Image (cartoon, rainbow, N blue to C red):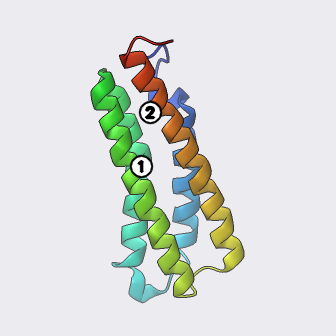
Amino acid sequence: MENNKSFESLEAWKMAREFRKEISINSKTFPKHEEYKLKNQIDRSSRSVSANIAEGYGRYHYKEGMQACRIARGSLSETLDHLYVAIDENYIDQEKFNILKGKYEHCLKLLNGYVLFLKNKKNGNP
């Protein structure tokens, strides 16, 4: 699809990976009773972001790549909602929430930029 050799070179994927790692570190501190509820959900939604970027890259068609990135964007928003639950339940503090939300925003910006790049390539724009 692009001149990159692998999804691993995509800035959107790199940031999604960083975000996923931070979510995983923090979800390990959630109470035991959240093991199969919030912890499981936030881990799965954050993993879905980078996984969908990688999957879309592997599709080799701009339209499918953009659709996979839209799914990734939905998973990213879902993860943010789970972060709101974590702060509302006092599983993370405001400072940690702000850091993670900043990473969410950066990831969203890169993901939106990648979707725009794919759209432009699909339409024959450089």
In the rendered picture of this protein, how many numbered marks are placed on residues?
2
The spot of residue 68 in percent (x, y) is 32, 39
For badge 2, the amino acid type reads Val
Q: Is residue 25 above or below residue 90?
A: above
For badge 1, the amino acid type reads Arg
The spot of residue 83 in percent (x, y) is 51, 71
Q: Are marks 1 and 2 in contact (CB under 8 Å)?
A: yes
Bin the neighbour count of mark 1 within 10 Å (Cα to Cα): few under 14, some 14-19, many 20 and up. Answer: many
Numbered badge on residue 73: 1
Residue drawn at the location 61% of the way across and 48% of the way down: 106
Chain-order first, disc 1 or disc 2: 1
The reply to whether residue 120 is visible in this rendering is yes
Foreground of the two, 18 or 63 = 63
Q: Quadrant of the N terminus?
A: top left
Q: CA distance from mark 1 to mark 2?
A: 10 Å
Numbered badge on residue 115: 2
Residue drawn at the location 68% of the way across and 78% of the way down: 94
Residue drawn at the location 45% of the way across and 63% of the way down: 79
